[in-house]
């Protein structure tokens, strides 16, 4: 299985427009972060988790020419607003499979009414096939993906386990019975916004405590704010098996 970190930034991305914060001004490519998303590939299958406003650039960066589906964690704008850019895939492949909680589909149907309409469409508008996710395993390609249910402040959000890889973003609370789904992982990806506590995201301390509880072989942190600091400084402070993810990082499991 190959994982590509398409984006590892929090909602505004890094650099933030107009910001003079030192991290936003950094020349290190590892300090430049598009909105959070990950590409998961195995056998001949390619799935993307979330489809934020940087989706087009991310597909170009990772040279993706086919996707088998988009799997949504939740409906926030930084995770959904690139949906229109599935068009090139739609033109080549036909209807694109989307996987999401029914509440997330409701939000998408409102924002992208022209995609979901049952009326005749304007030429060039993409079509999608909806797959509702509940908190039970669902099929993606030739494997079962296991949803992991958590809370992003008060909003329900799904993380996903693909074989020995799990991807959890925008989590603040994960109940113990959901943590149990994360045994024996090769790689866990989890959100860590910054050092300061935050209402709806794990901060660094909470993310490290969560990693300690799950005990994957390796863990990567994502959904990072400029307030976390420079990549190279933060990486030095982390335990041996924990890494600060950065855009375009690829790992093989
Ligand atoms: Zn987010």
Image (cartoon, grey):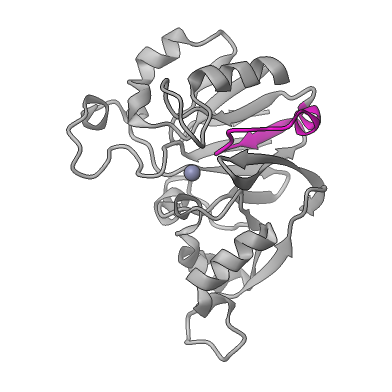
Q: Is residue 195 visible?
A: yes
> Is residue 180 one of those drawn in magenta?
yes
86 displayed left or right of 151: left
In this view, the residue in front, 128 or 209, is: 209
Q: Quadrant of the C terminus?
A: top right
Residue 60 within the magenta-colored segment of the rendering: no
Q: Is residue 243 above or below residue 90?
A: above
The image quadrant that residue 103 belongs to is bottom right
Q: Which span of residues is magenta-colored? A: 164-182
Q: Image quadrant for the N terminus? A: top right
Which residue is at a point 59% across and 58% down the rendered structure image?
66
Residue 114 lies left or right of residue 213; in this view the side is left
Vertical placement of residue 14 versus 69, above or below: above
Residue at 82% from the left image edge and 47% from the top image edge: 137
Residue 216 visible within the image? no
Relative side of 232 to 175, left or right:
left
- How many marks on residues? 0
Q: Horizontal and vertical percent for residue 108?
A: 55, 66
Q: Residue at x 49, y 34 (%)?
A: 199
Q: Classify residue 89 as left or right of residue 71.
A: left
Q: Between residue 185 and residue 207, name the one nearer to us.
A: 207
Residue at (56, 22) in percent of width and height: 207
> Which of these two is toward me, 46 or 157?
157
The picture places residue 93, in percent across and down from the top left corner, at: 62, 69
* Residue 78 on image: x %, y %: 45, 50
Q: Residue 55: image x %, image y %?
A: 45, 54
């Amino acid at each position: 299985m190959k994982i590509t970190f398409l984006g590892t930034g929090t909602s505004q991305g890094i650099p933030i427009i107009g910001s003079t914060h030192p991290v936003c001004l950094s020349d290190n490519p590892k300090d430049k972060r598009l909105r959070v998303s990950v590409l998961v590939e195995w056998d001949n299958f390619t799935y993307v988790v979330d489809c934020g406003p940087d989706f087009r650039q991310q597909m170009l960066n990772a040279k993706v020419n086919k996707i088998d589906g988009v799997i949504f964690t939740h409906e926030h704008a930084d995770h959904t607003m690139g949906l229109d850019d599935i068009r090139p895939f739609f033109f080549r492949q036909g209807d694109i499979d989307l996987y999401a909680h029914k509440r997330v589909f409701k939000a998408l149907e409102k924002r992208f009414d022209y995609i979901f309409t049952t009326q005749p469409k304007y030429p060039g508008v993409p079509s999608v096939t909806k797959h509702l996710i509940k908190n039970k395993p669902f099929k993606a390609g030739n494997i079962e993906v296991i949803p992991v249910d958590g809370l992003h402040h008060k909003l329900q959000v799904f993380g996903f386990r693909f074989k020995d890889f799990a991807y959890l973003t925008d989590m603040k609370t994960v109940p113990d019975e959901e943590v149990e789904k994360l045994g024996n992982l090769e790689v866990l990806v989890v959100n860590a916004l910054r050092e300061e506590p935050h209402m709806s995201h794990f901060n660094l301390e909470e993310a490290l405590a969560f990693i300690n509880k799950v005990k994957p072989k390796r863990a990567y942190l994502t959904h990072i704010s400029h307030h976390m600091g420079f990549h190279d400084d933060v990486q030095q402070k982390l335990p041996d098996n924990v890494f600060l993810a950065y855009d375009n990082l690829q790992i093989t499991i």
